[in-house]
Image (cartoon, coloured by chain):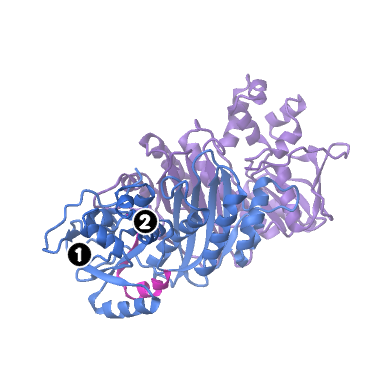
Chain colours: A blue, B purple
Amino acid sequence: MSFRVASAPASGEDSLIARYFKPIATDAGAFSLNDDAAVLKAQGADIVVTTDAIVEGVHFLPGDPPDTVARKALRVNLSDLAAKGATPAGFVLTLALRSAEDAWLKPFAAALGDDAKSYGCPLIGGDTVSTPGPLTISVTAFGRVPAGKMVHRSGARPGDRVVVTGTIGDAALGLDILKGGAVATALAGDEAARQMLVGRYRVPQPRNTLAAAIRAHASAAMDVSDGLAGDLTKLCAASGVSAAIHTPGIPLSRPAAALVANRTIGIDTLIAGGDDYEIVCAVPEADFEAFAQDARKAGVTVTPIGAVIAGSAAPSFLDERGRELALTRRSWSHF
Amino acid sequence: MSFRVASAPASGEDSLIARYFKPIATDAGAFSLNDDAAVLKAQGADIVVTTDAIVEGVHFLPGDPPDTVARKALRVNLSDLAAKGATPAGFVLTLALRSAEDAWLKPFAAALGDDAKSYGCPLIGGDTVSTPGPLTISVTAFGRVPAGKMVHRSGARPGDRVVVTGTIGDAALGLDILKGGAVATALAGDEAARQMLVGRYRVPQPRNTLAAAIRAHASAAMDVSDGLAGDLTKLCAASGVSAAIHTPGIPLSRPAAALVANRTIGIDTLIAGGDDYEIVCAVPEADFEAFAQDARKAGVTVTPIGAVIAGSAAPSFLDERGRELALTRRSWSHF
């Protein structure tokens, strides 16, 4: 680990770490980033480990503001912890930078520190390396769950309800706007909608307040990062089940619903689009009311969108008349 | 985390993970890479966390064989765990790839699995992302130490011996050979020496068998990754001490010693060169014999090279007549 600060001949790397990251590494286990490693205390719990990297030009755009890039890098990992029912415990950061520019690093570190504080997930260590390529930010985040209580992708049973948090597809629309696509044109006169959708792409809202409810009530859960259709397919495959989804019941934001209504986009685009960072989970029928109540207390909207059914087929997405939609693409893949 | 394997419509990413990484993720906490997160059991210990990334063209060369790249990516992290006195517990991997080529991934994963097994450090999760830039491999590794027993950079006291493992500077010579520098020319007729030095650059030999001895006897320790002079400077700064090093006592390999003797290179090049992945530590005088004995049992050569002294100056490197060497550069820095 090269989050190292020397009082002696400071290298460029050391001084940038000292300046920007030391102030936000306030956890005791971070040793003020003065050591080669951090210490994480399990406190009798299982440590849940998740890692997700974001790459400029792939997961965020070269022009994206540094503060939103920082928040996205951490939040895509917080989203995994939430879906697994884990309480955030800390994270390490690897920054591959072309150059160390104060104008970029200062707002990046400030936003990262801000999120670390609000989500209770302190920076405990990291590495900075130089690269001739695109800016790449890799985060490994840690959470705690009571021993054996991590919520898995497997565990969904026929009869369980399929539930999603928030709204689906907004981030894909936001990306289309940033790329000047059809959505940008359709919403040319609606600045508020454009901003909301772009915000959904740039700054995910991970559902960490829902972690305890997921742990208490969900039979299976995962975060929706590569598209609802594809991610639900993975959850079903891991659980050895299928699902029937009432597509008109999938929660959409007002602008997304309007774009579907006026046929600018199809619902298939929304359910195959990535970057939602919502949670999809299976909740046994008997638990549903208690789950919905806990979700209300947590301030998270949850919507039942269908049912887990027996079988090994990929989940069907049915229209208002019960006809299955033909999905040409279920999710985003890197290769 | 996107180490995800779906039995349903397999994306390119899913199938490459399944093919190459699932077989080496044998730890129970990895859930066969079928989930979004892994579980690490602390078993009553502190979890030591370290993270180090390696970038093509910076930490390894574009032509380096995939198996040596894999080993280096893991071993630079194992080296940190060794220096902190921790026993390896597992790691997560983030691969930023331009393309997913079987011819590269197959030997990469095989070597990674081989090292994971021999060092007892299983792959528990990871992420693969596409990048238009250089191949970047980020590893976060975990170790266990008895609560509160991680060995720090701070803790060295005046009177302690300064000790290093193995030999210093070989990797810097190996890199020079790969780049066709002066060392390549000087050793044109000595294929065995060239191979040894290149091997030292490409495949570090982390001193994990020494971890228990470090924990038992060292007052401070770190691994030597950015150059002995610079890294010892950091250890001294963190400990609030200085050091006097008897430079002729620094252990060199036979080829390195010959190159210094015939003035192809200066000793300063060796002690400022990076990529040694040896350990530098401070050992109280009273502990030294026991430490040396434990090291022998662990099969690791340790050499005392000087003494910790009071003061806040950077460590002095003294020649055979006790004159201080003027070091223009103490270590490698990325920026």
Magenta-colored span: A208-226
Q: Which mark is residue A275?
A: 2
Residue placed most toward the observer, A133 or B223: A133
Q: Which mark is residue A314?
A: none
Q: Is residue A213 magenta?
A: yes
Left or right, A252 with respect to B282, comes to left
Please, which chain is the residue tagged with disc 2 on?
A
Q: CA distance from mark 2 to mark 1?
A: 21 Å
Instruction: Please state the horizontal and vertical placement of residue B144, each as a whole percent of the image.
Output: 55, 61
Instruction: Say what amino acid the circle numbered 2 marks.
Output: Asp
Residue placed most toward the observer, B321 or A137: A137
Please, which chain is the residue tagged with disc 1 on?
A
Q: Is residue B47 visible?
A: no
Q: Earlier in the sequence, mark 2 or mark 1?
A: 1
Q: Splitting the image into 4 quarters, where does residue A76 fall?
A: bottom left
User: Up-down: is B36 above or below A87?
Assistant: above
CA neighbours of label 2 inside 10 A, class few (<14), some (14 to 19), many (20+): many
Q: Residue at position x 21%, y 62% from top?
A: A241
Instruction: Say what amino acid the circle numbered 1 marks.
Output: Pro
User: Up-down: is B276 above or below A60?
Assistant: above
Instruction: Please state the horizontal and vertical placement of residue A200, each as a whole percent of the image.
Output: 39, 60
- State the residue position of label 1: A248
Q: Residue at position x 44%, y 54% from top?
A: A52
